[in-house]
Image (spheres, rainbow, N blue to C red):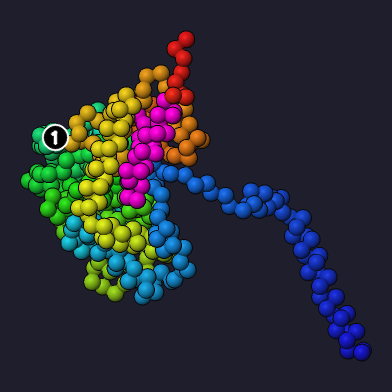
Amino acid sequence: MHCAVVLLASRAAFAAPLRACHAMASNLLHVLPPQGLLRPLAVPERLLLGPGPSNVPPRILAAGGRQLLGHMHPEVLQVMDDIKVGIQYAFQTQNQLTLAISGTGHCAMEAALLNLVEHGDTVLVAVNGIWGQRAADIARRLGASVHELLKPPGEYFPPWDIEEGLVRHKPSVLFITHGESSTGVLQPLEGLGKLCHRHGCLLLVDAVASLGGAPIFMDQQEIDILYSGSQKVLNAPPGSAPISFSERAREKILRRKTKPPSFYLDMRWLANYWGCDGEPRRYHHTAPINSFFSLREGLAMLAELGLENSWEHHRVNCAQLCQGLRDLGLELFVKEEKARLPTITTVRVPEGYDWKEITAFLMDNHAIEIAGGLGPSVGKVLRIGLMGCNSTSRNVDRVLHALRDALRCCRRSRL
């Protein structure tokens, strides 16, 4: 009994300072627990028919929800190997230096430029939308001498304009966007790689908005650097971005006089981590494991469907949408049919309407997202995306019905 009393007394003596410390610590907290974080997460169900991201199908959601593994576990390295061959299939390339950047498609753009471009290099950028503008900005930040080829939004670059720029400026890199999501333009790539190589230049192509939705043949078209994103046709969450470098591009990276300005995006380190250099893999960064799971499944679904089938159903559904928009009396922004991006269609904002009211009406009344313009197309267009699992005839009918409703309800009086 005496022992029990002593034990209780000692416990009380030990607990008293702890209570005092807790009270003191509580008095030191000037920021209270946020009330919003004490409520359950609420995410509405919406049909995402903007320029991206797209809705994620159940199979990819399930993959991203799997339990974590270590980023150097053999099972994760195998997933990375699956991703590499999936990207090679999607890009139609046998390039050894093929991997996924731990970041969005914009991160892949930065990785491509900062690994290729050194201070004083000459870079030629084809600008007909926001992505050319961004690439020119990034290249200037790297100390490059940047020259711009300009086209109005809605137009593409014919090869003779490209050759004139190559002859005049003699760049080491040409940047061009295959699928310009801000304007809805699809840039023809045939012959550009050969043209660039004839003038001693590398061809860098942005395919974030076009991969899987429009034909692209990296090796056959002699593209030197190609990158994309995960959140559009591949229907995976944003966060892992496919990229590939030709042997010409890899050699330019190896000949650099200075290290790339980013350790995180240094392609020599990433090549090793992804098993692209034939050396034992070494730790570089803690990769977004679950994003890799999702990207792997997105590439698997593309492989199961087949690239040619994917290209065709995007073409067919885009044609249905374009005809339906004309039937509503709307004007397509890109005049030439061959120059229209099959994944993102742009339509002029009709006279007498505010684009913000139209997009808000679709969101509030139909739970459908479409977007306004971006960069040089701001205020001029509405952008409607049909990508991956969202590219269906039923979704075309849904968005056309919603737009018909919006045109009836949102028109402004001229008085």
Task: Give the magenta part as a residue range.
Answer: 380-407
Residue 410, given in percent of the width and then of the height, sits at 46, 24
The reply to whether residue 124 is visible in this rendering is: no
> Left or right: 171 with respect to 325?
left
> The N terminus lies in which quarter of the figure?
bottom right
233, 269: nearer the viewer: 233
Residue 330, given in percent of the width and then of the height, sits at 32, 26
Q: Main secondary structure of the magenta part?
A: helix
Q: Which residue is mark 1?
A: 158
180, 385: nearer the viewer: 385
| Vertical relation: 104 (above or below) 254 | above
> Left or right: 325 with respect to 359?
left
- Type of amino acid under label 1: Pro
Which residue is painted at 30% across and 32% down in the image? 324
Residue 127, given in percent of the width and then of the height, sits at 25, 35
> Left or right: 153 with respect to 46?
left
Residue 28, given in percent of the width and then of the height, sits at 74, 55
Residue located farthest toward the left when viewing the structure as drawn? 198
- Is 378 colored magenta in this rendering? no
- Is 397 colored magenta in this rendering? yes
Number of numbered callouts drawn: 1
121, 47: nearer the viewer: 47
| Neighbourhood count class around disc 1 (C-alpha, 10 Å): few under 14, some 14–19, many 20 upward | few
